[in-house]
Image: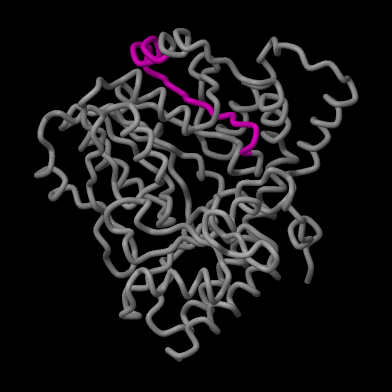
Amino acid sequence: MTNPLFDPIINRFGTHCAKWDKMEDIYGVPAKDGIAMWVADMDFRPPAVVQAALEKMAEHGVYGYFGDESDYLAAIGWWMKHRHGWEIDPAWVFTTHGLVNGTGLCVDAFTEPGDGVVLMTPVYHAFHRVIKAAGREVVECPLALENGKYMMDFDAWDAQMSGKERMLILCSPHNPGGRVWTREELEAVAAFCRKHDLVLVSDEIHHDLVMPGHTHTPMALIDGIEDRLVMMSATTKTFNIAGTHSGNVIIADAKLRETFAARMAALGISPNSFGLEMATAAYSPEGAAWVDELIAYLDGNRRIFDAAIAEIPGLKSMPLEATYLAWVDFTDTGMSREEFTARVEKTARIAPNHGPTFGAGGENYLRFNLATPRSIVEDACARLKEAFSDLQ
């Protein structure tokens, strides 16, 4: 059964697309027949309601400064309440140039040079980059691997704390492991941050991309953390509009909000009209219906990919509870990282993300983006089986 929303193959070459146009330069995977499975954007068009909003802007033809954000803020409030059970005040919302920018602003606003920023590794590689560039120290707290999935290890992490740590950045749901943290785990994170007096920045950009059978809990719904909590969310991953570089930093605590507002003002940051219009359109009943179809499609891709990986001796795909990013462990192949990576890139002609970029614990992993037409996922599976056929 075909799906007209997600099955069509859209040629993204020659469109200044990082994922496809930079694949050969960065990975050596040939553009002529390679498969890009690295950058975390989707090879799908956004919902029609988003496209219509852009067409309306183009028809008007004047692209001046944006004023009156009431519809935009109302759309964010509607989405958070109806999709996540979280009621927000519009006054809590700051719009940044994406959530990597939001992360950088949080590091700048709430820490000083030389302070420690805690990451549960392996984790989204941009966190490392931003923290180091700001002159802060990355404090890697390795996640424990239990029965093939990541677990938090607070006893070990307590022993690591030196007193110079000022912030913890939580990736919820987790990228690259695909974990949906339970309420009990989130309560333990809150307790850890209180114990060590850490500002908690919760990056929840993947919160809409949760597989059937799992439920995401916003960190804002955990008791006793509001006075140190910064929430980050965005339409960009959910609706494949990352090029708008729009994200939201949502802060309920007045003192934290005042500090963050001062940094925003000092840096002269304001949103672009395209991002606001697209987000307003996306956070709607039409957008919600599209997301429901997307999740079902991604779940189908996940099942196909995981079944193929399970047929290759020595490879393990971590159970994907959220995101569209498969985290594959090559440890049991007995191969060096250079060898299994070469088989994927040179033999299978697939460009994945390299595990070590995500920090400690990622050394024997590759991350594969499954948000692409099913026929491409099936092609990638066949190529991986062939590349490792001598193990079967």
Q: Quadrant of the C terminus?
A: bottom left
- Using the rendered view, name the quadrant where residue 195 is placed: top left
By what rule are the colours in the image chosen?
one colour
Q: Residue 312: horizontal and vertical position, in percent?
A: 46, 83
Q: Residue 137: horizontal and vertical position, in percent?
A: 23, 34
Q: Residue 336: horizontal and vertical position, in percent?
A: 32, 73
Vertical side of 372 occupied by 232: above or below: above
Q: Tell me the residue at 43%/63% (across/down).
A: 366
Q: Which residues are magenta?
A: 242-260
Q: Which of the pair 130/80 is nearer the observer?
A: 130
Vertical side of 371 occupied by 334: above or below: below
Q: Which of the pair 59/88 is nearer the observer?
A: 59
Q: Tell me the residue at 41%/77% (across/down).
A: 315
Q: Which of the pair 337/58 is nearer the observer?
A: 337
Q: Which of the pair 271/182 is nearer the observer?
A: 271
Left or right placement of residue 157 versus residue 340 in this view: left
| Magenta-drawn stretch contains 330 | no
Q: Tell me the residue at 58%/70% (across/down).
A: 349
The residue positioned farthest toward the right in the image shown: 59
Q: Residue 212: horizontal and vertical position, in percent?
A: 55, 59
- Using the rendered view, name the quadrant where residue 246 is placed: top right
Vertical side of 386 occupied by 176: above or below: above
Q: Tell me the residue at 28%/27% (across/down).
A: 135
Left or right placement of residue 294 versus residue 60 in this view: left
Left or right placement of residue 249 versus residue 61 in this view: left
Vertical side of 206 occupied by 100: above or below: above
Number of residue marks: 0
